[in-house]
Image: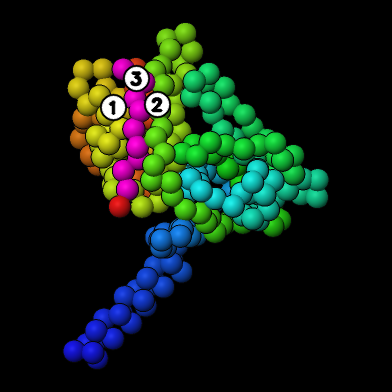
């Protein structure tokens, strides 16, 4: 029996190591997560290519945008121009804030808020980066209501937990309380490789078929808000 258990343990370790190298899963423990996140570079053919909406763990070692840029190996001004850029969106006002790496010391973000990394092409630009951190299981988040006078108000870029129980967009609809009937809520999943985004309305087949990407943030929006929820996780 001891030999069988030892073989099983070794097999599990080898599988986990293989998946980590492939960058396909986050490694979780009681203390934190580690993921190798792909970061496609920008393209002159499409300004949306290279825009990665990233989920940063709720507890993380990145004191500000400059620290994040440094740790992820992003192109940084003034020695590397064009520098990579970081963007966050205030869901209440709809206003975005964008800074370039090297000028991002004042750039911080709230736990649970996804940020956009624009990985500019050029010498030294990474194709992926290691992101680390841990989760806050007690944190509650609020999706604000939309506003007809400003289409950006109510756009909540949600940093999906790395050990979320949600697999599809519909799972997020259910977990957040967004409407799946009547005037439905919606989930938008951007694709940094193609520069496009996949929208899905809650309660539709598309929402059940839209698979969430590990380490990626998604946009939540619902005109029936506000909705306050605690992100579901294992």
Question: Are the residues at dot 2 and dot 1 in contact (C-beta closer than 8 Å)?
Answer: yes
Point out the image quarter for the N terminus: bottom left
Task: Please name the residue shown 38% across and 30% down the image.
Answer: 220
Task: Please name the residue shown 62% across and 54% down the image.
Answer: 72
**What element does badge 1 sit on?**
loop
Work out whether residue 109 can be spotted. Answer: yes
Q: In front here: 195 or 75? A: 75
Q: In front here: 179 or 81? A: 179
Task: Please name the residue shown 39% across and 18% down the image.
Answer: 145
Question: Are the residues at dot 2 and dot 3 in contact (C-beta closer than 8 Å)?
Answer: yes
Measure the C-alpha gap from mark 2 to mark 3: 7 Å
Residue 33, image x, y percentages = 45, 58
Measure the C-alpha gap from mark 3 to mark 1: 8 Å
* Chosen colour scheme: rainbow
Is disc 1 surrounded by few (<14), some (14 to 19) or many (20+) residues within 10 Å?
Answer: many
Span highlighted in magenta in the image:
224-233
Seen from this angle, which residue lies furthest front?
A: 138
The image's mark for residue 143 is 2
First in sequence, mark 2 or 1: give its number. Answer: 2
Residue 230, image x, y percentages = 35, 37
Q: In front here: 162 or 77? A: 162
**Residue occupied by mark 1:** 178
> Is residue 230 magenta-colored?
yes
**What element does badge 3 sit on?**
loop
First in sequence, mark 2 or 3: give its number. Answer: 2
**Residue occupied by mark 3:** 225
Task: Please name the residue shown 40% across and 51% down the image.
Answer: 162
> Is residue 214 magenta-colored?
no
First in sequence, mark 3 or 1: give its number. Answer: 1
Q: In this image, 97 relative to 105: left or right?
A: left
């Amino acid at each position: 029996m001891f030999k069988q258990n030892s073989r099983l343990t070794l097999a599990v370790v080898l599988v986990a190591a293989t998946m980590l190298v492939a960058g396909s899963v986050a490694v979780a423990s009681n203390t934190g997560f580690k993921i190798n996140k792909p970061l496609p570079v920008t393209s002159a053919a499409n300004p949306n290519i290279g825009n990665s909406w990233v989920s940063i763990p709720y507890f993380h070692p990145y004191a500000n945008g400059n620290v994040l840029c440094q740790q992820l190996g992003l192109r940084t001004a003034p020695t590397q121009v064009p520098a990579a850029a970081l963007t966050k969106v205030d869901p209440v006002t709809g206003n975005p804030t964008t800074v370039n790496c090297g000028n991002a010391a004042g750039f911080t973000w709230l736990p649970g808020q996804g940020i956009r990394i624009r990985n500019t092409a050029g010498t030294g630009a990474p194709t992926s980066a290691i992101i680390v951190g841990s989760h806050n299981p007690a944190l509650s988040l609020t999706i604000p209501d939309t506003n007809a006078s400003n289409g950006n108000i109510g756009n909540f870029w949600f940093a999906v937990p790395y050990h979320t129980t949600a697999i599809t967009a519909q799972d997020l609809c259910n977990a957040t309380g967004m409407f799946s009937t009547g005037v439905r809520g919606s989930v938008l999943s951007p694709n940094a490789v193609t520069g496009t985004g996949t929208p899905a309305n809650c309660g539709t087949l598309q929402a059940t078929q839209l698979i969430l990407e590990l380490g990626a943030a998604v946009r939540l929006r619902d005109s029936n808000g506000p909705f306050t929820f605690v992100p579901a996780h294992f």
